Amino acid sequence: MMRVRLLFGDDALDVHGGSGRTLLQMKKACNISFENLDYSVLTDKCKGPQYPAKPCCDAFKEFACPFSDAINDLESDCASTMFSFINLYGKYPPGLFANECREDKNGLDCQNVEQSKKSGGVQIAATQSSLLMLTAGLLALLLQLF
């Protein structure tokens, strides 16, 4: 069962690992470009000042579930990076999703998120990246010819 752990929940400050040295070790960089994703699924459906739980949590799951493996990787900075950009683009109050969106102690269940929605954000980022690479390659080829 796929789960999204909310690292800003009750266990946000828990130490994961056998020794205190893990706190000093840097986390590996996230391989997902959260800065380039479309946050409109969140910003269109989760609006203040009330921030109703059902639409906000459904939107959060729709956005976050495609990245659940990366978000759950405690050795990467994906979760903190994702939440930083969610809060930057949505200007949400601190802890909104951690406090409102809880299904059980393990996090959120991503099984009921439609498969077509799960690949949407990743596909857009991959398409933009491929287009950029193709454009750069064509530009380099043109410069070589002249």
Image: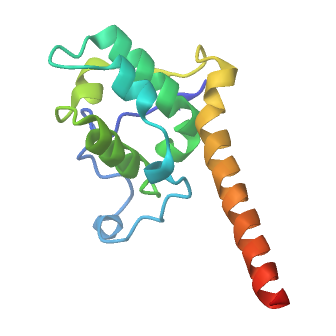
Find residue 145 and report its horizontal and vertical position in percent.
85, 88
> For residue 31, which quarter of the picture?
bottom right
> From the viewer's perspective, is residue 128 above or below residue 92?
below
Q: How many discs appear?
A: 0
Evaluate whether residue 102 shows in this view. Answer: no
Find residue 28 and report its horizontal and vertical position in percent.
48, 65
Q: In this image, 49 relative to 10: left or right?
A: left
> For residue 132, which quarter of the picture?
bottom right
Q: In this image, 71 relative to 8: left or right?
A: right
> For residue 69, which quarter of the picture?
top right
> From the viewer's perspective, is residue 77 above or below residue 7?
below
> From the viewer's perspective, is residue 46 above or below residue 119?
above
Residue at x 43%, y 52% (from the top left corner): 35
Find residue 55 and report its horizontal and vertical position in percent.
36, 12
Residue at x 47%, y 24% (from the top left corner): 61
Residue in front for this viewpoint, 18 or 143: 143
Find residue 75 and report its horizontal and vertical position in percent.
46, 57
Residue at x 72%, y 66% (from the top left corner): 135
Q: In this image, 60 relative to 46: left or right?
A: right
Evaluate whether residue 109 shows in this view. Answer: yes
Dividing the image into 4 quarters, which one contains the N terminus?
top right
Residue at x 61%, y 48% (from the top left corner): 125
Rendered image coloring scheme: rainbow
Dividing the image into 4 quarters, which one contains the C terminus?
bottom right
